[in-house]
Image (spheres, rainbow, N blue to C red):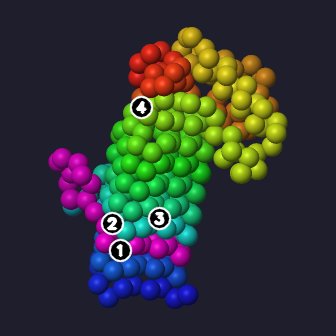
């Protein structure tokens, strides 16, 4: 279909709209926004507004880039980046549900789903095929790995390793095995991810070091297990830990490194 722009939508000069997009009533697309092909923007969403950052220089030329086939529902806000020439990035085939917020300098990979009222603070990165449940809130600079699944109303302030299930406050509850099977991961990859998960999360020492040793050992041959272990070499916020019982992490408190 041809691009449809509702008469009440506002498209500022300098915004770029791809082919076959749909921009519904009251939506605002600000200067510096680039929409890929077949992007849908719901009613009264604001894409590319100024960052909610004290002292931000509004004269900076920054923007938002949204990949093809992404759906943005009503009343979503996505802020532009804070550094000259940079952009907040949403990947392809993402689905961002009503009233969600993506703050400045976030980077979402492809096929990310954010349910209603999810709030991402600035500089959050989200891996491919991650799912964030309704009402979840994520602290700035947190990394959310590939195929992570976060429960509704969770509070996230630590990095979440790929393929994990996470609930409540930074509580890892297991692996997202159903998600991995749906994505077509091989049995060998899933077996190695399970082994790597046990080795890292059942350790009583620094899990960053445990993951590095496991990666260097040569015991893990699949790229997927390697991705899981490599994740622990980066980041600044520490890592969410395994929940030992309801509401409590492996250490009995919100976990750092």
- Residue at image mark 4: 169
With 218 as the anchor, is 162 left or right in this view? left
Q: Earlier in the sequence, mark 2 or mark 1?
A: 1
| Helix, strand or loop for the magenta stretch, by majority | loop
Does the magenta-highlighted stretch encompass residue 123? no
Q: CA distance from mark 4 to mark 2?
A: 26 Å
Q: CA distance from mark 2 to mark 1?
A: 6 Å
Residue 88 placement (x, y as % from top left): 40, 56
* Residues under numbered marks 2 and 1 in contact, where contact means CB atoms less than 8 Å apart: yes
- Residue at image mark 1: 43
Q: Earlier in the sequence, mark 4 or mark 2?
A: 2
Q: Magenta region: which residues? A: 31-58
Q: Earlier in the sequence, mark 1 or mark 3?
A: 1
Residue 59 placement (x, y as % from top left): 21, 61
Q: CA distance from mark 4 to mark 1?
A: 32 Å
Q: CA distance from mark 1 to mark 3?
A: 17 Å
Residue 126 placement (x, y as % from top left): 50, 46
Mark number, residue 75? 2
Q: Residue at x 30, y 52 (%)?
A: 82
């Amino acid at each position: 279909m041809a691009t449809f722009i509702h008469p009440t939508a506002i498209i500022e000069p300098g915004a770029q709209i791809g082919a076959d997009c749909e921009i519904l009533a009251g939506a605002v697309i600000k200067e510096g926004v680039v929409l890929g092909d077949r992007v849908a923007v719901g009613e009264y969403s604001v894409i590319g507004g100024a960052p909610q950052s004290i002292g931000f220089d509004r004269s900076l030329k920054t923007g938002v880039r949204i990949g093809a086939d992404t759906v943005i529902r009503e009343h979503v806000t996505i802020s532009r980046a804070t550094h000259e020439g940079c952009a907040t990035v949403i990947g392809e085939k993402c689905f961002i549900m009503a009233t969600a917020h993506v703050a400045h300098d976030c980077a979402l990979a492809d096929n990310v789903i954010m349910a209603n009222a999810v709030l991402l603070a600035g500089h959050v990165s989200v891996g491919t095929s991650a799912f964030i449940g309704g009402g979840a809130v994520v602290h700035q600079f947190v990394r959310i790995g590939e195929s992570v699944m976060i429960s509704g109303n969770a509070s996230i302030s630590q990095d979440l390793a790929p393929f994990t299930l996470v609930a409540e406050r930074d509580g890892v509850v297991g692996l997202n095995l159903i998600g991995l099977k749906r994505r077509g991961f091989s049995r060998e990859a899933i077996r190695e991810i399970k082994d790597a998960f046990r080795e890292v999360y059942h350790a009583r020492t620094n899990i960053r070091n445990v993951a590095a040793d496991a990666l260097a050992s040569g015991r893990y041959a699949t790229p997927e297990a390697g991705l899981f272990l490599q994740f622990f070499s980066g980041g600044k916020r520490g890592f969410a830990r395994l929940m030992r019982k309801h509401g409590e992490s492996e250490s009995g408190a919100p976990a750092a490194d």
